[in-house]
Image (spheres, rainbow, N blue to C red):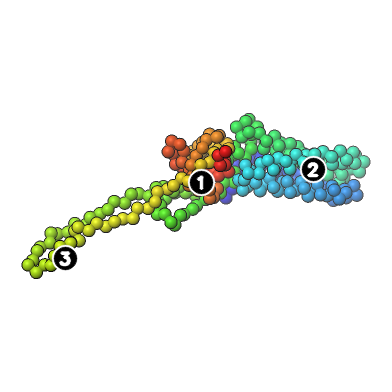
């Protein structure tokens, strides 16, 4: 379950954006005489942008679609500016619906300016700390559980996050038996007794870290979860595989833990 509620600023702007769009939509319906076909398309476009921003924050995929969202927001601000250039003078004449239409668009354009500033800033900057990357350990995290049936593995569980550890080494055991008594009728083939047989235990394969990934942003591990790893921007780690939203990784100093997948990309 996602935890977007932890980022109060983004949650507030998203709710306010939906309210502003609803005000603009109702105003456009009342002021339908002055709303052309292109204006209706802009209304739909604004709704799609708000829904898109909501989805990437809830699914914790902001890092993957950051540039696309910024491009759509840039186009949206231009379209809203053009619309306001017409709606504001019309609201002075017609009032009512035109006024609500203009009010909704003014609120939307303010929110989108804030989004561009926050989404476009580095996560380590003062403005970027209000963005989703700063809340990477709480916004939209979906914990991943995975089992590999081809390997016998031991599991260390903490909450809903899973770490695969190297399996314990099994040592061969030799059962002890009482010394056998010899008789005159014993044949040579019976000289091999059970006391000389060793039970061989199959050795499960250790965990293999097959790939290397590079950190796109710095990350501070959640102090409540000892399995999470902290890392710096540009740090290279080794991972087991690329499945799920959390990857098991190993740092250069040998520390093993889990890392959020959306913070990493293959090294150049």
Q: Which percent across, then down, holds residue 220?
A: 53, 36
- Hey, which residue is sitting farthest left in the picture? 184
Q: Which percent across, then down, holds residue 182?
A: 9, 63
Q: Residue at x 62, y 40 (%)?
A: 132
Q: In which quadrant of the rendered view does residue 75 lie?
A: top right
Judging by the rendered image, the residue that carries numbered circle 1 is 247
Which callout, 2 or 3, points at the residue further toward the start of the chain? 2
Q: In which quadrant of the rendered view does residue 15 lie?
A: top right
Q: Residue at x 81, y 41 (%)?
A: 79
Judging by the rendered image, the residue that carries numbered circle 2 is 104
Alpha carbons under labels 2 and 1: distance apart: 42 Å
Camera-side mark, 2 or 1: 1
Q: Which percent across, then down, holds residue 102?
A: 83, 41
Q: What secondary structure is found at the residue carrying circle 3?
A: helix
Alpha carbons under labels 3 and 1: distance apart: 56 Å
> Is residue 233 left or right of 110 when viewed as pictured?
left
One can see residue 203 in this view: yes
Q: What secondary structure is found at the residue carrying circle 1?
A: strand
In this rendering, the answer to whether 208 lies above or below 230 is below
- Disc assigned to residue 189: 3
Alpha carbons under labels 2 and 3: distance apart: 97 Å
> Is residue 38 left or right of 52 when viewed as pictured?
right
Camera-side mark, 3 or 1: 3
């Amino acid at each position: 379950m996602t935890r977007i509620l932890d980022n109060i600023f983004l949650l507030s702007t998203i709710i306010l954006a939906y309210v502003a769009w609803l005000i603009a939509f109702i105003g456009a319906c009342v002021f339908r005489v002055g709303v052309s076909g292109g204006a209706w398309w802009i209304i739909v476009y604004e709704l799609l942008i708000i829904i898109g921003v909501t989805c990437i924050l809830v699914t914790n995929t902001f890092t993957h679609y950051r540039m696309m969202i910024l491009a759509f927001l840039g186009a949206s601000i231009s379209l809203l500016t053009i619309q306001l250039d017409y709606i504001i003078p019309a609201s002075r004449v017609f009032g009512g619906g035109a006024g609500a239409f203009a009010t909704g668009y003014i609120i939307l354009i303010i929110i989108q300016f804030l989004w561009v500033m926050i989404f476009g800033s580095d996560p380590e900057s003062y403005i970027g700390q209000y963005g989703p990357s700063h809340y990477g350990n709480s916004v939209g995290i979906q914990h991943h559980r995975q089992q590999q049936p081809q390997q016998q593995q031991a599991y260390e569980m903490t909450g809903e996050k899973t770490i695969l550890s190297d399996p314990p080494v099994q040592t061969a055991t030799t059962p002890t038996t009482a010394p056998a008594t010899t008789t005159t009728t014993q044949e040579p083939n019976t000289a091999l007794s059970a006391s000389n047989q060793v039970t061989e235990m199959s050795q499960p394969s250790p965990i293999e870290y097959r790939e290397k990934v590079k950190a796109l942003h710095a990350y501070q591990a959640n102090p409540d979860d000892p399995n999470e790893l902290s890392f710096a921007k540009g740090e290279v780690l080794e991972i087991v595989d690329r499945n799920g939203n959390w990857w098991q990784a190993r740092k250069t100093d040998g520390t093993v833990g889990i890392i959020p997948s959306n913070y990493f990309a293959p090294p150049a």
